[in-house]
Structures are given as C-alpha cells and as structure tokens.
Image: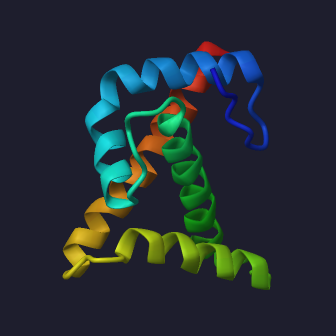
C-alpha cells in the first residue's frame, strides 16, 4: 500500500489509519473522486483523495488563522484546491458540501491516526 506522505505522520500508523477510514467513508471518497475525475478502478486512488483532503485542511487552517501571514505559495495552493472542487459546480452550497467532506475526511484521518498511535 502506498504511504501518505504528509508532515507528522509515521508510515505504518498512517497505512492502518487509512485502511480503517476507508471502511467507514468509502462513499465520501468516491464522491470526491468523481468530482475530481480521479478513476476509482486503479489502486491508490483513496490515497490521492486523502492527500487532497489533508492539503485542503492545512490550507483551511492557514486561511482561518488571523495571526498567520500567508506566503504566495500557500495562497496559490489554496486557490488551486478550491478551484479543483468548484469546477462544474453551479451553487455555493454544492461547493460547501464538497469542502465539508474534504475537511471531515482529513479530521477523521487525524483522529484515527491519533488513536492508533
């Protein structure tokens, strides 16, 4: 299984956490994959979605922190992630729904990882 390379996560614990999360949240993973046009027939697509969710969560925390100065790369990364979700959406409610899924998957991964550690 492919490793989630994200700051602060150990390899084996993250693999176990991903496997547990996928059991309960397969539909949410599939919904994001469909929106982002990531084929679900191959291996590792769940890790791509989770990596997106973790990156999205990091960007959200950066934007929400009033005391943090955002560098150009963080702003660009955030806009790219939001654009990826927003492409083809017709309402803000649709976009907010997808953002909530991404945020929730990232937070649940962190919670499962923490319990396993």
List x then y, in percent, for residue 80: 56, 76
Residue pictured at 66% horizontal, 27% vertical:
2
List x then y, in percent, for residue 89: 25, 76
- In this rendered view, identify the residue nearer to me: 66 or 61: 61
Report whether residue 55 is seen: yes
Report whether residue 69 is seen: no
Residue 9 vertical placement versus 60 (above, below): above
List x then y, in percent, for residue 102: 42, 53
Left or right of 23? Residue 8 is: right
Tell me the quarter of the picture where residue 86 sits.
bottom left
Left or right of 37? Residue 14 is: right
Tell me the quarter of the picture where residue 30 sits.
top left
Residue pictured at 38% horizontal, 34% vertical:
41
- In this rendered view, identify the residue nearer to me: 100 or 28: 28
Number of dots carrying numbers: 0
- Image quarter (top left, top right, bottom left or bottom right) of the N terminus: top right
Residue pictured at 46% horizontal, 71% vertical:
84
Applied colour scheme: rainbow
Left or right of 68? Residue 61 is: left
List x then y, in percent, for residue 116: 61, 14
- In this rendered view, identify the residue nearer to me: 64 or 83: 83
Residue 25 vertical placement versus 86 (above, below): above
Residue 77 vertical placement versus 34 (above, below): below
- Image quarter (top left, top right, bottom left or bottom right) of the C terminus: top right
Left or right of 46? Residue 1 is: right
Residue 108 vertical placement versus 7 (above, below): above
Residue pictured at 65% horizontal, 73% vertical:
77
């Amino acid at each position: 299984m492919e490793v989630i390379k994200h700051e602060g996560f150990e390899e084996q614990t993250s693999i176990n956490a991903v496997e547990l999360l996928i059991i309960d949240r397969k539909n949410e993973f599939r919904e994001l994959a469909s929106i982002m046009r990531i084929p679900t027939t191959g291996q590792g697509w769940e890790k791509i979605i989770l990596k997106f969710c973790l990156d999205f969560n990091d960007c959200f925390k950066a934007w929400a922190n009033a005391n943090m100065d955002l560098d150009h790369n963080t702003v660009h990364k955030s806009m790219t992630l939001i654009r990826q979700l927003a492409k083809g959406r017709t309402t803000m409610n649709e976009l907010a729904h997808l953002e909530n899924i991404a945020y929730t998957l990232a937070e649940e991964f962190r919670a499962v990882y923490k319990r396993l550690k």
